[in-house]
Structure formats: C-alpha cells, structure tokens
Image (cartoon, rainbow, N blue to C red):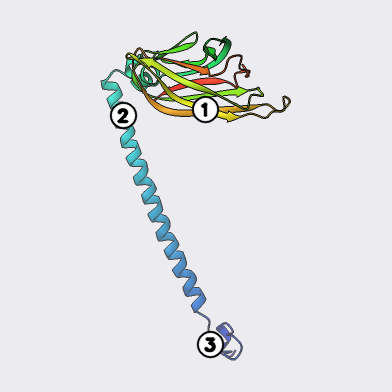
C-alpha cells in the first residue's frame, strides 16, 4: 500500500496554489477567541468589584441605622418638608365677586383661595395680606368682555406708610360685542414685607370681565 503523500493530507489551497495549506483564518479565529475570553474575564471582575462596593455601602448604612435605632417617622426628622410648608408659601386666588365704585371710577375684585400652601399669605376679601416677608413671584390675569377700547388691571401694594403700584396691564378690545374678548396677563418678582396688603383693581366703573377661575386669577409664590 503506497505511503500517504503530504499533498493528499493537506487541504486544497486557493486556485493557483493547489498545494499550499490555509492557516491564517484559523490563527485569526484563535486570537479573537482568546481576546474575547480576556475581555469577558475583565468585565466579570469589574462587575464583581462594583457589587462588592455597593454591598459595603449597604452594610455601612444598616450599621448606622442600627446604632441610631432605625429610621424615625417624626416630622422633625425630615427638614426638607418644612421649607415648602413654612417658607415656600403659595397662594392662587380666583374671583367670587366684584364691586363697582362710581365715585372713584374703579372696579374691585373679591378673591377666594383655590390653592394655598404655607401661612405666609392670607386672602381677606378684596385684599391679600402678607404675613411672611420675602421675595415673591406675583402674577395676575383678567379675562375682559367689554367693548371699551382699552381695558386692564392694576396690582397695588399698601404698607409701611405708603401705597404704590406694583404693575399694570393694558390690552386693546374689539368694538364688536360678539368678539370683545381679551385677556390681560402680567407677572413680576417683588420684595413684600410683613403687614403689606395687595389688591387688584380695574380702573373703570362697571367693568365687564369673566369671573371664571381659568379666565381671571391672582397668584403668589414665595421664592
């Protein structure tokens, strides 16, 4: 029986080199497998390190809670609840009534709270009283339904022996009664003092505007 020829055992090479064995693809696959195994081992080691770090952090937290007798449910243990209730006062007002004064040619708005947080502000009929001094975001809107060529509102403050206008809003009105709708919105940041009273007036007697809560409102947010 004839001896096996090495040319018969070797795989057939590409065309033009029938006798050359193909070894480069096999070597490349082996290198990729070895690199993949190394990267996988490195990823596992990093994940294990992260888990150990988190476990140590949890152990320290449990130990701290055990020494302190566990988490307390008292309100005093949560100081982040107090700033919103005591410092970040919020008051959003909606109209409930109006009063027209012919002698001074103004219309005043009576308010009631729709949203209130904290005790820094209080609605008292036609005025809002400030109990907590500080900087406030103040906003006002009136939805007018009037054929008078211009309408608007004035937000005033009275306190510390003086009265002043904080801001005013003026808008043009259509002459057609069916289309005579327009809203006037203004806002600003003001330093209000304890004891100040604020009010909204329309500088026209018998002014016509909406008393709906989405059309006319007044609001304060302590900053």
Residue under label 3, please give it. Answer: 20
Q: Nearer the viewer, mark 3 or mark 1?
A: 1
Asked if disc 2 and disc 1 are in contact, CB closer than 8 Å, the reply is no
Q: Is residue 5 visible?
A: no
Q: CA distance from mark 2 to mark 1?
A: 56 Å
Which is more toward the observer, 59 or 4?
A: 59
Mark earlier in primary sequence (2, 1):
2
3D distance between C-alphas at marks 2 and 3: 67 Å
Q: Percent position (x, y) of residue 14?
A: 59, 85
Q: Secondary structure at mark 1?
A: strand
Q: Position of residue 64 (x, y in %)?
A: 28, 25
Q: Quadrant of the N terminus?
A: bottom right
Q: Position of residue 52 (x, y in %)?
A: 33, 41
Mark 2 secondary-structure assignment? helix
Residue at the image position 26 percent from the left and 21 percent from the top:
67
**Between discs 2 and 3, the one toward the N terminus:** 3
Q: Looking at the image, can residue 63 be seen? A: yes
Quarter of the image containing the C terminus? top left
Tell me where residue 40 sits by quadrant: bottom left
Q: Which residue is mark 2?
A: 61
In this view, the mark in front (2 or 1): 1
The image quadrant of residue 149 is top right
**Which residue is label 1 attached to?**
169
How packed mark 1 is, by other alpha carbons closer than 10 Å (few <14, some 14-19, many 20 or more), is: some
């Amino acid at each position: 029986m004839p001896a096996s020829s090495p040319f018969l055992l070797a795989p057939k090479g590409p065309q033009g080199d029938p006798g050359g064995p193909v070894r480069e693809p096999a070597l490349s696959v082996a290198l990729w497998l070895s690199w993949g195994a190394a990267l996988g081992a490195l990823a596992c080691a990093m994940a294990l390190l992260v888990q150990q770090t988190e476990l140590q952090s949890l152990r320290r937290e449990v130990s701290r809670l055990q020494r302190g007798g566990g988490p307390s449910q008292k309100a005093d243990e949560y100081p982040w609840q107090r700033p919103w209730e005591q410092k970040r006062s919020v008051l959003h007002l909606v109209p409930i009534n109006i009063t027209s004064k012919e002698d001074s040619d103004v219309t005043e708005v009576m308010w009631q709270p729709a949203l209130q947080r904290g005790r820094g502000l209080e609605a008292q009929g036609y005025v809002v009283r400030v109990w907590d001094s500080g900087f406030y975001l103040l906003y006002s809107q009136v939805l007018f339904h009037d054929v008078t060529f211009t309408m608007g509102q004035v937000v005033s403050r009275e306190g510390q022996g003086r009265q002043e206008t904080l801001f005013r809003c003026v808008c043009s009105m259509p002459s057609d009664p069916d289309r005579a709708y327009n809203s006037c919105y203004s806002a600003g940041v003001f330093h209000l003092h304890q004891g100040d009273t604020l009010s909204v007036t329309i500088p026209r007697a018998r002014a016509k505007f909406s008393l709906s809560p989405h059309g006319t409102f007044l609001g304060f947010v302590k900053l």
